[in-house]
Image: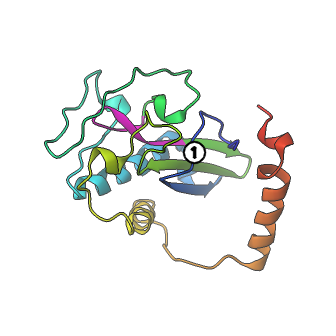
Amino acid sequence: MRRRTGGGAILHHHELTYSLTVPAQNRWSKKNSDLYRLVHLEIIQLLHQSSVVAQLFGDLDGTQQTPASDHQTFPIDPIDQNDFMCFKRRADGDIILDGHKIVGSAQRRKRNALLQHGSILLFGSEFASEIHGLNEIVPTWPDLRNLAEKLAKAIFARLKADYSVGVPSDQELDASRVAYSSQFDSNDWNLRR
């Protein structure tokens, strides 16, 4: 499925997807690279709380990480910036664990907002067996069920924003149905590059 932010293909199979929209007048919208880094550093901090040492790709200084003793080691495929699959590419700010990309994000600015979204790869997929997820590399990593809520709370705290969980309004549900049918359910939109 085509994404508004472009980029390589992602198998939405075994991953946690997040999105964050910041109004254009918000200071974080004007500092989009800082926002990107902030979100990824919060993900890294959550991983560190579970003794998983991941790093930002640009911070690796050309060296590979040494896997911890309880990590499963997989051969690391050469990085190909033109690969069809997003998780085979690397960009500054991607989150790397034992040489494997486990988190990637993208941004798109519109006139009145900045959208950032990304994927935390939890498990690989049988449809792309060369890509490995967090729970394969660190099979003893604890329960992932609360990861989404922990991440949301951490990001909101760093952004100094109020965190609350709500139910979509009828108007929001109608708008999402229109967007889905006119774009994501449309080959005309999905196949256009």
Q: Position of residue 66 (x, y in %)?
A: 18, 32
Q: Position of residue 106 (x, y in %)?
A: 56, 41
Q: Tell me the residue that label 1 is attached to.
A: 30
Q: Residue furthest left?
A: 69
User: Is residue 24 part of the magenta span, yes or no?
Assistant: no
Tell me the quadrant of the picture where the N terminus can be found: top right
* Figure colour scheme: rainbow
Figure check: 44 above or below 67: below
Q: Please rate how many residues cluster around mark 1, counting C-alpha atoms within 10 Å: few if below 14, some from 14 to 19, many from 20.
A: some
Report whether 84 appears left or right of 133: right
Report whether 33 appears left or right of 142: right
Q: Residue furthest front?
A: 126
Residue occupying the point 49% across, 43% down: 126
Nearer to me, 34 or 36? 36
Nearer to me, 83 or 93? 83
Nearer to me, 75 or 82? 75
Figure check: 75 above or below 127: above
Question: Mainly helix, strand or loop, the magenta region?
Answer: strand
Secondary structure under the numbered disc 1 in the rendered image: helix
Residue occupying the point 48% across, 20% down: 80
Tell me the quadrant of the picture where the C terminus can be found: top right
Q: Position of residue 36 (x, y in %)?
A: 48, 44
Report whether 10 appears left or right of 94: right
The amino acid on which the numbered mark 1 sits, given as a three-letter code, is Lys
Magenta range is: 93-105
